[in-house]
Amino acid sequence: MYTAYFTQIIDYQKTFFDNTYEAVVKLQDQGSQMVDWVVEKNSLIPEDAKKQCTYWTDFILQNQKNYKSYVDDSFAKVKGFYESLEPVKAKAAPAKKAK
Protein backbone atom coordinates (compact mmCIF):
# COMPACT_ATOMS: atom_id res chain seq x y z
CA MET A 1 0.00 0.00 0.00
CA TYR A 2 2.66 2.49 1.04
CA THR A 3 5.03 1.43 -1.72
CA ALA A 4 2.77 3.16 -4.26
CA TYR A 5 3.06 6.39 -2.27
CA PHE A 6 6.84 6.11 -2.05
CA THR A 7 7.19 5.42 -5.77
CA GLN A 8 4.95 8.40 -6.54
CA ILE A 9 7.14 10.58 -4.34
CA ILE A 10 10.26 9.30 -6.08
CA ASP A 11 8.68 9.91 -9.50
CA TYR A 12 7.80 13.45 -8.44
CA GLN A 13 11.34 14.10 -7.21
CA LYS A 14 12.77 12.65 -10.43
CA THR A 15 10.55 14.91 -12.55
CA PHE A 16 11.54 17.90 -10.43
CA PHE A 17 15.22 17.01 -10.84
CA ASP A 18 14.87 16.49 -14.61
CA ASN A 19 13.18 19.87 -15.10
CA THR A 20 15.74 21.69 -12.96
CA TYR A 21 18.60 19.86 -14.67
CA GLU A 22 17.32 20.86 -18.12
CA ALA A 23 17.12 24.51 -17.05
CA VAL A 24 20.71 24.43 -15.78
CA VAL A 25 21.87 22.62 -18.93
CA LYS A 26 20.35 25.32 -21.12
CA LEU A 27 22.15 28.02 -19.13
CA GLN A 28 25.45 26.15 -19.26
CA ASP A 29 25.08 25.49 -22.99
CA GLN A 30 24.46 29.18 -23.60
CA GLY A 31 27.49 30.06 -21.49
CA SER A 32 29.59 27.55 -23.40
CA GLN A 33 28.48 29.01 -26.71
CA MET A 34 29.34 32.51 -25.48
CA VAL A 35 32.81 31.41 -24.39
CA ASP A 36 33.39 29.68 -27.72
CA TRP A 37 32.23 32.75 -29.62
CA VAL A 38 34.43 35.15 -27.60
CA VAL A 39 37.47 32.90 -27.90
CA GLU A 40 36.89 32.42 -31.63
CA LYS A 41 36.44 36.11 -32.43
CA ASN A 42 39.14 37.53 -30.20
CA SER A 43 42.48 37.68 -31.99
CA LEU A 44 44.32 38.77 -28.80
CA ILE A 45 43.88 35.37 -27.14
CA PRO A 46 46.84 33.03 -27.81
CA GLU A 47 46.17 29.70 -29.48
CA ASP A 48 47.15 27.73 -26.36
CA ALA A 49 44.60 29.65 -24.29
CA LYS A 50 41.93 28.97 -26.93
CA LYS A 51 42.69 25.25 -26.73
CA GLN A 52 42.49 25.40 -22.95
CA CYS A 53 39.10 27.14 -23.04
CA THR A 54 37.80 24.57 -25.52
CA TYR A 55 39.12 21.75 -23.33
CA TRP A 56 37.35 23.09 -20.24
CA THR A 57 34.03 23.66 -21.95
CA ASP A 58 34.16 20.12 -23.38
CA PHE A 59 35.14 18.77 -19.96
CA ILE A 60 32.20 20.51 -18.29
CA LEU A 61 29.74 19.28 -20.91
CA GLN A 62 30.97 15.69 -20.57
CA ASN A 63 30.72 15.79 -16.78
CA GLN A 64 27.25 17.24 -17.11
CA LYS A 65 26.19 14.08 -18.96
CA ASN A 66 27.97 11.83 -16.44
CA TYR A 67 26.22 13.56 -13.54
CA LYS A 68 22.81 13.05 -15.15
CA SER A 69 23.59 9.38 -15.69
CA TYR A 70 24.65 8.90 -12.05
CA VAL A 71 21.53 10.59 -10.71
CA ASP A 72 19.25 8.61 -13.04
CA ASP A 73 20.87 5.37 -11.88
CA SER A 74 20.44 6.39 -8.25
CA PHE A 75 16.76 7.19 -8.73
CA ALA A 76 16.27 3.81 -10.42
CA LYS A 77 17.97 2.01 -7.51
CA VAL A 78 15.88 3.79 -4.88
CA LYS A 79 12.67 3.19 -6.80
CA GLY A 80 13.57 -0.47 -7.25
CA PHE A 81 14.19 -0.75 -3.53
CA TYR A 82 10.72 0.52 -2.67
CA GLU A 83 9.04 -1.55 -5.38
CA SER A 84 10.64 -4.72 -4.02
CA LEU A 85 9.32 -4.20 -0.48
CA GLU A 86 6.49 -6.40 0.60
CA PRO A 87 3.97 -5.30 3.20
CA VAL A 88 4.52 -6.57 6.70
CA LYS A 89 1.58 -8.43 8.15
CA ALA A 90 0.47 -7.46 11.63
CA LYS A 91 1.06 -10.03 14.32
CA ALA A 92 -1.99 -11.43 16.02
CA ALA A 93 -2.59 -10.11 19.50
CA PRO A 94 -1.93 -12.68 22.23
CA ALA A 95 -5.01 -14.41 23.53
CA LYS A 96 -6.32 -13.24 26.91
CA LYS A 97 -6.25 -15.74 29.70
CA ALA A 98 -9.61 -16.79 31.05
CA LYS A 99 -10.26 -16.18 34.77
Image (cartoon, grey):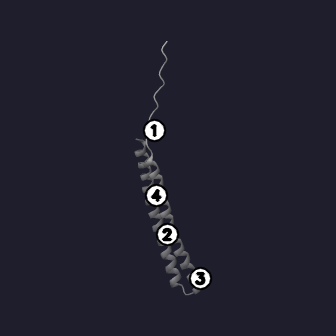
> Which residue is tagged 4?
17
- From the viewer's perspective, is the residue at label 3 or at label 4 nearer? 4
Question: Between marks 2 and 1, how big is the CA–CA gap?
Answer: 47 Å
Callout 3 amino acid: Ala
Callout 1 amino acid: Val
Residue for point 47% across, 72% down: 30
Which sits in the foreground, 14 or 53? 14
Q: Position of residue 61 (x, y in %)?
A: 50, 71
- From the viewer's perspective, is the residue at label 2 or at label 1 nearer? 1
> Which residue is tagged 2?
28
User: Compared to 11, does 88 lie above or below?
Assistant: above
Q: Residues within 10 Å of mark 3 (few under 14, many from 20)?
A: few
| Residues tagged 1 and 4 counted as in contact (Cβ below 8 A) | no
- From the viewer's perspective, is the residue at label 3 or at label 1 nearer? 1
Q: Secondary structure at mark 4?
A: helix
Which sits in the foreground, 85 or 18? 85
Which sits in the foreground, 26 or 17? 17
- From the viewer's perspective, is the residue at label 1 or at label 4 nearer? 1
Marked residue nearer the N-terminal end (3 or 4): 4
> Which residue is tagged 1?
88
Q: Position of residue 20 (x, y in %)?
A: 46, 60
